[in-house]
Image (cartoon, helix red, strand yellow):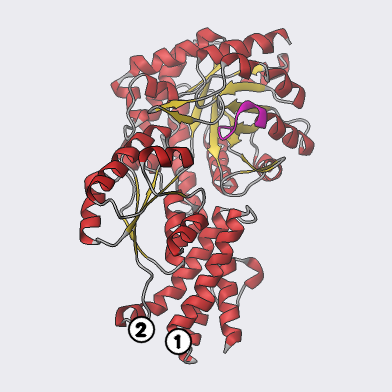
Amino acid sequence: MTLLDKLKNKQVLISDGSWGTFLQQKGLQAGDCPELWNIEHPGDVLAIAQSYIDAGSDMIETNSFGGSRFKLAMFGLQDRVHELNKAAAEISRKAAGTDKTVLGSVGPTGKILMMGDVTEEELYNAFKEQCMALEEGGADAIVIETMSDITEAGCAIRAAKENTKCTVICTMTFEQSAPGQYNSMMGATPTEMVEQLIPLGVDIIGANCGNGIEGMIDIVKEIRKSNTDIPILIHANAGMPQYVDGKTIFPESPNQMASCVNGLIDAGANIIGGCCGTFPEHIKKMAEVAKNK
Amino acid sequence: MEDILVKLGYCVEFGKVDKNAPYPPDMKGQDGADELTKQAIEQGISAAVILEDALVAAMNRVGQKFTEKKIFIPQMLMSAKAMNAAVAHLKPFFNSGEITRKGKFIIATVKGDLHDIGKNLVKMAIEGAGWEVIDLGVDVPTEKVLETIQANPDAKIGLSALLTTTMGNMQVTVESIKSKYPSNAIIIGGAPVNEEFKTKIGADFYAPDPQSAVSYLNR
């Protein structure tokens, strides 16, 4: 059953929690390439995927957020796009079995189109290469996430739609720039995201990172104002990170996040999960609330 | 004579690089920062006046609007690009000593951190304010920063970190600099960094946005 079919049967589905923060907990150091762990520490990556499935996630992402050739080039790994992304999807597929959905994670390239760093065609080709490898490894859907530039997000959506059979999800990262106003780093608003990305054929839209779960309720409301039908996915941080005594702390507890789940559902969210600083316990608590709704 | 400086300032403020540049759409086909700077020099306006009255003043307005969230990163980057096109024509006057820069500023993203957008924004704003910027790039080890200070003993320093996991490396770099060069001012910035962290690690200034870094250096 495709993700869209599953959404027709059920009001709300649960997604997974953090990957980056979780990998760090397992020993990933600053400056290491997370995607290389798919080859060098596949057991740890599988353990993360499995722990979210066990916590009640209906879907699991892949460890491939920085798997585009532009990001991998920072580690000299630009020629291993296919291998690293395929391995990422295979690991998550193993945890998901046949009935849970695997979401192939695709993050931004870090290049800025407007400045002439890259062309749209170069971005399209990089995303195409990554998405095809994720599909080959077993991804059912592609989740293009943490986007701040609508044009870059559009390149990724077209690449995924035109070269794979996967369901295509796109979530952007918004921060509060004034009371009640949300903008991405590049200035895009949730409304602009809806107006410009839905015509490209994206199946599910939403927001991730950049906010605690309360800000996400406002963002869902803004999306719903301009579109009543498109499924919305939210991956919320456990609040914004704080640095205390040499350690990174994400302030929102599993219970705190769970207490906002009904608000998100009432605003119109269809898939709810976590981002930075969320762990299986967060997902478990959020899933309990969603399932009792 | 003043008219051309107003026009040039407008090009920098709104990111019109040169005549062929498609951005911004409402200035299509008009002269940009590139052409207007050349014309201003040909008209005999002094390089120092062009720099201060048109370019630096415009970048100041850009920085202000960015701080107030009236514009976002793309607009700021286009302004910086227009600024660079203008400054290219002023290079001979810098080299001859006819105009001088305000000082040197060393900027780097700390070790383990590969993010450069924030660092580049600050770099552009500080260059735009008339400073010479030495950009060490991303993932910069402490030793590299120390060597660069040794070669540029009066330089001020800016350090960037986007990740909470690299804030520890920022602390190491700041402490090493301060033990060897206690009088060189250090500005820190980046999403997870704040005033409290600045005090804790002994840096001199926390810049929440590019414009506040400029104000700190110029004071």
Toward which corner of the image does residue B1 lie, by quadrant? bottom right
Q: Pick the residue in front: B20 or A141.
A: B20
- What residue is disc 1 on? B46
Toward which corner of the image does residue B131 lie, by quadrant? bottom left
- What residue is disc 2 on? B98
Q: Position of residue B37 (x, y in %)?
A: 49, 81
Q: Is residue A11 magenta?
A: no
* Letter of the chain that mark 2 sits on in the rendering: B
Query: Which residue is depicted at the point 60% across and 44% down?
Result: A184
Question: Mark 2 vs mark 1: which is more N-terminal?
Answer: 1
Asked if residue A271 is positioned above or below residue B50 in the image, the reply reads above
B3 with respect to B167 (left or right) = right
Asked if the residue under mark 1 is in contact with the one under mark 2, i.e. CB atoms within 8 Å, the reply is yes
Asked if residue B164 is positioned above or below residue B102 in the image, the reply reads above
A271 with respect to A165 (left or right) = right
* Letter of the chain that mark 1 sits on in the rendering: B
Question: Of the residues shown, which amino acid type is indicated by label 2?
Answer: Glu
Residue A227 visible, this orientation: yes
Toward which corner of the image does residue B14 lie, by quadrant? bottom right
Q: Is residue A209 magenta?
A: yes
Q: Position of residue B174 (x, y in %)?
A: 31, 44
- Residue A158: which disc? none
Magenta region: A208-215
